[in-house]
Image: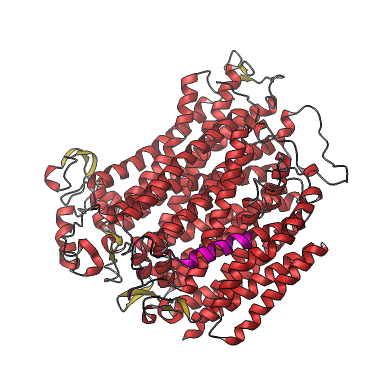
Amino acid sequence: MDLDPVLIGRWQFGITTVYHFWMVPLTLGLGMLVAILQTIYHRTGNEVYLRSTKFFGKLFLINFIMGVATGLVQEFQFGMAWSEYSRFVGDVFGAPLALEALLAFFLESTFLGLWIFGWGRLHRAVHLGALWCAVIGSWISAYFIIVANSWMQHPVGVELVDGRPVMTDVWAVLGNNTAIAAYTHTLFGALAVGGSFLLGISWYHLYHRRKDGIDTVGADGTVVVGSSSELPGRDEIDHRVWINSLRIGAVVGIIAFAGVSITGDIQAKLMFEQQPMKMASAEAACHDGTEFSVLTVADPSSNDCDGVQNIFEIPGLLSFLAKGDFSTPVHGVTTLLPEYQDKYGTHIPDDPRYGDHAGEPIDYQPIMIVTYWGFRMMIGFGILAAGVCAIGLWLSRRGTVPDSKWLSRGFLLAITAPFIANSAGWIFTEMGRQPFVVAPNPAQLDGVYMYTQAALSPEVTPGMLLFSLISLTAVYGVLMAVELRLLTTYVKGGVASAMPELASSSTKPTITDDGDDVLSFAY
Amino acid sequence: MEILATIWFILIVVLWTGYLFLDGFDLGVGMMLPFLTRGERGKRVLLNTIGPVWDGNEVWLITAAGAMFAAFPHWYASLFSALYIPLTLCLLSLIFRAVSIEYRGKGHTPAWRSFWTWAMAVGSAGTAFCIGALLVITTTGLPLNGHGDIVGGAFAWMSWPVLLGGLGGLGFAFVHGLVFLGLKTQGDIRARVQRWAARAMLPAAVPFLIWFALSITHRAWLSIPVLVGIISLIAAVVAVRAGAEKRAFVLHGIHLVAGFGAVFAGAYPNVLPSTLDPANSLTIATASSSDYTLTVMLIVTVIILPVIIGYQIFSYRMFLGRIAETHIPEAHRVPVAIRS
């Protein structure tokens, strides 16, 4: 087979990782929001928040398990497909992964089990604490994995021993400025996902309460809350569950947008210094200049600068994003290419460890169409998500949503916007790092870098990579359909889908014959 | 300094043993889900015995792999890339195991239930087989070249240790699941698992016992822990027959711990031998990270591992009681509030 194993390996890693990172931001963002909802319930005893906690907690769990299942693949595939990478970076890269398991995953999974089964069994405060431990565990895990990723973007805290980076300063690795910027950026991105999720689903329920004639509006447009006797749980409290969740979600979405903007700006300024080629490609900036491109087109079949046409640009804005003023020119690809070639050579070394790629010319320029549009999709969908939150907040100001099917569908669909923004951002930053798997850090420790072409497991063949690529993608596809179907079913069931006690009018025995409690929750 | 690498070797063996000790019974319960009880309530009893704890147990696996990566990157890289195809199958098994426990009860058609019941069984059995094979292979070795890469293609790992380890993993998890259910259930199921355990315990342990015996041939003193393991196993059988469930569970665990201790003490200082040339074998010296990394990781582990064990014990104590069919609430059918 003359398939390029590196290319298949990259597709395999890309697909499994982007997929995993659909579950993760929802776990991080929604987990935090459910913990806040339960905290409010704990403080006030208000049933509205109990219902919100149980309903969104159920959706959280349906999604959480997929994150767990697909996360295992992440940890194993470094060694399986990228053994040369693992050998090269193991001294510094393995540590955050092990720390993630020790400090985060144990906390997260043990306490989540306590939370799921602990309703009515644990003391209320302990039960709430268990959820917080699980959520904090997930946030800690995000930190360690981003430390690991940021070391690939901007290696620090090591020295080269026998051609291999060896950790000399763990605090430098953990305190990598790239990691801190990326971590905060990721968390706000996750909160945007959580916020949009609450907004879209709450909108859908408020719309259906209006459509079914449960809620109506008075002459001044203010909601007149009603109650349905036919359907479980659709009473007056139900209305407050949704309107509260809608507002919390929208406000969180807007705050998250402010957060991603600030942290993204910090991150971009770092990236202009640390990985100038990535940012030049993100801008399709072929030549030095100060202009931010609003629209640039190029012949998609080639990746060189000749075919790039800047249609509309804003002078000064790029310099402001990169350096904080409006006049310092930012280096473009044509300036940077010779600099990279001077430093790192024009060809991959003629060394057997590069396999078929030995002696090939190196293209230091990432695939510009991916970086350019990835960067813009991240920003565009981020703005869209926040805009939808602001509009949603305004349209629901009188206590319910307009009786419009299309608006309701639009707000449901808008849940995908922050997911797309998250994926686009990661695809941009990972593709923008190429041709390096570990990007060089010329300012601090030149010499620690690795080409992606050298990272693959030498003995792994294209056929083996295809086997895992196809089988995992197929299974992931089926499981995505199952997860979406379950989420839809539970969303349509409303709060009662997470609270059987709302659905049943008769009171069931909660004590068995031998005096034990019936489990308040059971699989 | 090889002391640090030695300590990390021991810790990684502790993590793998801890994984099999804990998740072993989850896997065992999972693999017997279609067979042990016919009724739906009985199956739900089984699932709920492991429900609150299985995910925390699985983290022992993540930690073992992560610690291998951090402390012995060459071990991790060589072993995992050499076992590319079996580990892909292992991951698919782990994925189905995890998802099935959460999703099985969320649908109500017989086809849905039956699909996830089998996904749970096949996923659990596949995981137990693959992990058992991986552990046996890391002591019996692979055809590695001087770079630490397997020679001979995608299936070069296929040989008798795979079968031995796979059957050993299956057998151990199956019996461990039975003795665990003996502690956690009541009534019919409790009686049945006692009968099954009494019969299965010795034959199921044979593959691992062969591995234990083969691993210590060059170090006579290691026959002491292996004997401890065998005696524990026999005592466990006696305990099962006597209905002493707690004792049976503990003794069955001791048999694992003693055997694994002997095996890996026998393998030391090799972490992954080469069957082509002993000079290509990975040892704790050639596979390990720098002393600095090992020290940092050791400090964190020494501080945090007791805390983890502490809250995992807390979690087990919260869910200590036996579960009977009468404890299982009615299956909750999701109502349909919105019809369109």
Residue furthest to the right: A514
Residue A120 in the image, given as x and y percentages of width and height: 76, 45
Q: What residue lies at 72% left-to-right and 60% top-to-bottom?
A: B199
Residue B251 in the image, given as x and y percentages of width and height: 72, 69
Asked if residue A33 lies left or right of residue B1, the reply is right
**Can residue A99 be seen in the rendering of this structure?**
no
Which of B134 and A229 lies nearest the eye of the viewer?
B134
Q: Where is B316 relative to A446, above or below?
A: above
Q: In which quarter of the image is the C terminus of chain A?
A: top right
Asked if residue B4 lies left or right of residue B148, the reply is right
Which of B303 and A483 lies nearest the eye of the viewer?
A483
Residue furthest to the left: A306
Is A318 in the magenta?
no
Quadrant of res A178? bottom left
Residue A363 in the image, given as x and y percentages of width and height: 19, 56
Quadrant of res A492? top right
**Can residue A500 be seen in the rendering of this structure?**
yes
Residue A24 in the image, given as x and y percentages of width and height: 49, 48
Which of A432 and B109 lies nearest the eye of the viewer?
B109
**Magenta-tinted stretch:** B145-173
Q: Where is B43 relative to B289, above or below?
A: above
Quadrant of res A180? bottom left
Q: Which colour scheme is used?
A: secondary structure
Q: Where is A111 relative to B10, above or below?
A: above
Q: How many labels does the image show?
A: 0
Q: What residue lies at 56% left-to-right and 68% top-to-bottom?
A: B16
